[in-house]
Image (spheres, rainbow, N blue to C red):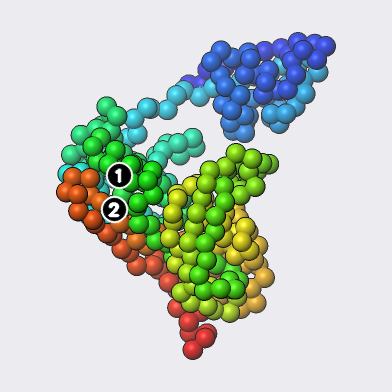
Amino acid sequence: MDTTYEFIAPGEGEAGRLDQFVARSVEGMTRSTVQRLIDEGRVTVDGKVEKPSLKLRGGERIVVAVPPPAPAVPEAEEIPLVILHEDSDLVVVNKSAGMVVHPGAGMPGGTLVNALLAHCTDLSGIGGEIRPGIVHRIDKDTTGVLVVAKNDRSHEGLARQFREHTIKRIYLALVFGSPKTETGRIEGAIGRHPTDRLRMSGKAKHGKHAVTHWKVLARYPGMTLLRLRLETGRTHQIRVHLAESGHPLVGDEVYGGTGRANDLRDPILKKLVRELGRQALHAKTLGFIHPSSGSYVEFDTELPDDMARIITYLEQQGA
């Protein structure tokens, strides 16, 4: 059951912005939490949902409905997984499109973590909790290889390799346009977009260093298949680097890929891209030093069917 708070905004401009006023009025509530509650329609002003930036004049009746906290430990769920490798230290999966890696705001279940809690019977705990250790993530609609730790030792061993950029990570990407050269390197800081909080950007004031290496595998009319090697692993790194270099991922609605799709003249290709319904990005290969054996291990996957269908059609058109 929600916990409800009611306030009357003070007069003479004392209240200020709606989000600031609520954050001051509800003990322990941050402004970011208030903004999320407003976005979810849980804050009303005189019975109406308003923007966080609304300037309160005074006298308005403000109602805040705070939902109960979500369980701290995700629940186990029987969700099918493609397991590439599993031992007492780690599990390697081939993640499908549409699966979020970890529960979060708006996504309490149906994630990879929920599935692993049901699948793994030998989790010894990460950070004192019985849960799989997420060392790295790939986006909800990106497919491919992902490794998860089963215990603290494995988690630290894998995390160190990610920090030191010694992990081998190869992606396949289908992009719009045709790069001028056969290989290249994209480098630049990536951070939160200055105006759109759902996007990342190379124009952020406080970004983190990011490097992506790319190589052309095949050129088609209007599209190119790229092999990408990540030197760093920033949020949305490939999507941002390719979009800002003028070659957005096919199907990427956040970074311009769907706009380019609307200009496709081939109705069959346009239909295939629409059916893809996601960015054409696949984490093909993952290689690392096993934290227990000390041996190098590598896992490789084939393109998922939705991307393969588009590439097969493009190859047939060029034959």
Q: Position of residue 168 (x, y in %)?
A: 35, 57
Q: Is residue 243 left or right of residue 14?
A: left
Disc with the residue nearer the chain's start (1 vs 2): 1
Q: Check disc 2: other Cα within 10 Å, few if <14, some if 14-19, many if 20+.
A: many
Question: Who's the residue at 62% across and 29% down the image?
Answer: 35
Query: Can you identify the residue that label 1 sits on?
Result: 158
Amino acid type at image mark 2? Phe
Question: Who's the residue at 63% across and 63% down the image?
Answer: 246
Q: Residue furthest right?
A: 12
Determine which quarter of the picture holds residue 73: top left
Question: Who's the residue at 56% across and 73% down the image?
Answer: 181
Q: Position of residue 136 (x, y in %)?
A: 38, 45
Q: Is residue 168 visible?
A: yes
Q: Which mark is residue 303?
A: none
In this view, the residue in front, 13 or 243, is 243
Q: Check disc 1: other Cα within 10 Å, few if <14, some if 14-19, many if 20+.
A: many
- The Cα–Cα distance between marks 1 and 2, rounded to whole angstroms, is 8 Å
Query: Can you identify the residue that label 2 sits on?
Result: 288
Q: Secondary structure at mark 2?
A: strand
Determine which quarter of the picture holds residue 197: top right
Q: Position of residue 210 (x, y in %)?
A: 51, 50
Q: Secondary structure at mark 1?
A: helix
Q: Residue furthest bottom?
A: 319
Q: Is residue 50 visible?
A: no
Determine which quarter of the picture holds residue 82: bottom left
- State yes or no: discs 1 and 2 in contact (Cβ < 8 Å): yes
